[in-house]
Image (cartoon, rainbow, N blue to C red):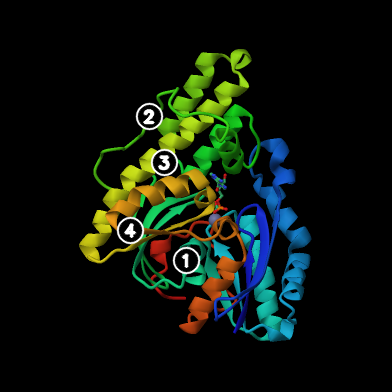
Amino acid sequence: MNILGIETSCDETAAAIVTDNREVLSNVVRSQNEKHLPYGGVVPEIAARAHLEIIESIIRQSITEAKLDFGDLDGIAATCGPGLIGGVIVGSMVGKAISASRKIPFIAANHLEGHALTARLTHNIHFPYLVLLLSGGHSQFIIAEGVGKYQIIGNTIDDALGEAFDKVAKMLGIGFPGGPALERVASFGSAGRFNLPRPLKGREGADFSFSGLKTSVRNKIEKMDDKNISEKDVQDLCADFQCAVSDIIKDRVVNALDIFRKKYPICEKLVLCGGVASNQVIRTTLEQSIQPLGINLIAPPLNLCTDNGAMIAWVGVERLRLGLVNTLDFKPRPRWSLDELKNSC
Ligand code: KG4
Ligand code: ZN
């Protein structure tokens, strides 16, 4: 089975072909970074137009690189939410058009399900498992019980972690997108100088809060006075921010594992996914903190953590296998929580 996946929910235009044997035959991702750079963040209208300009060539490239033809496709999955509505409309309309013209099944993919299921593509793991999803719009602990069956057991009560990375990077003027830029700058600094807070650390439950941490970074910058802030200050502040984030995650994961074990006593792995999961410091510190608890960290390769078409194609594989296909009148959903899926179309 060859499934085409289309992803256009934020600022990456992506298409990929994945088989039901877990082979990624192609995975084409085109970032719009340069277009949004002058604004220091993703501009929805610009993003939608940019998707429209290149979606066709990205899909053609994914088919050529897979050494296939349109006639070899057995199904098509396109992200239908959550995400920026303009981009989601572009991707889903193109997906529906291909589905209608080739008479192949259409799968309206939930972007978050794509992140959560990637570990089954890369590591062939079985349900149930605990997921830590850290992306630009979400920071959640999720119990994945089956395709379409998710229980959110921890959520951010304010900012998502990727958003916090992006905002702190913007405050420090170190580039866009903020996450990778901050990780790079932090690698030159040393943590421990700035005494940043760890919101919710030590508290019950598995929720996150990152807004106070972000505000604290802003206060430190203001105290230093823009003109006096040196390159070393910026590097150390980035290292401190990353260290605080890692500390918070280490604390929250213990509670999330407890909650998971109450429902499923055997737990041997934790799946980390979403764009922030490509951060090496977070991956390593999390792995080291859960190993003594007998838990293995399962994290997809970096290019399958950030947004891509392969994860959407894989949602297509998983859903098509269960006969969970959608009709072409499926309406894109800019807001679409994982616990609203309920293993249905
Ligand atoms: O999953 P993703 O590609 O898109 C969404 O679904 O949101 O995640 C994007 C987020 C952005 O906030 C980006 O800054 C962050 O992931 N990110 C990182 C790193 N790479 C991407 N954050 C920290 N460290 C990184 N290396
Ligand atoms: Zn994503």
Please name the residue shown 41% across and 27% down the image. Answer: 196
Asked whether the residues under the numbered discs 3 and 4 touch, taking CB atoms below 8 Å apart as contact, a structural biologist would say no
The residue singled out by tag 3 in the image is 246
The residue singled out by tag 4 in the image is 295
Asked whether the residues under the numbered discs 4 and 1 touch, taking CB atoms below 8 Å apart as contact, a structural biologist would say no
Secondary structure at badge 4 equals loop
The amino acid sitting under disc 4 is Ile
Query: Residue 6: image x %, image y %?
Result: 64, 67
Compared across the picture, whether 255 is left or right of 66 comes to: left
Query: Residue 210: image x %, image y %?
Result: 42, 37
The amino acid sitting under disc 3 is Ser
* Residue 51 sits above or below residue 43 on the image: below
The residue singled out by tag 1 in the image is 119
The amino acid sitting under disc 1 is Ala
Real-space Cα separation, disc 2 to disc 3, in angstroms = 12 Å
Please name the residue shown 51% across and 48% down the image. Answer: 276
Q: Which mark is residue 197?
A: 2
Secondary structure at badge 3 equals helix
Q: Is residue 1 visible?
A: yes
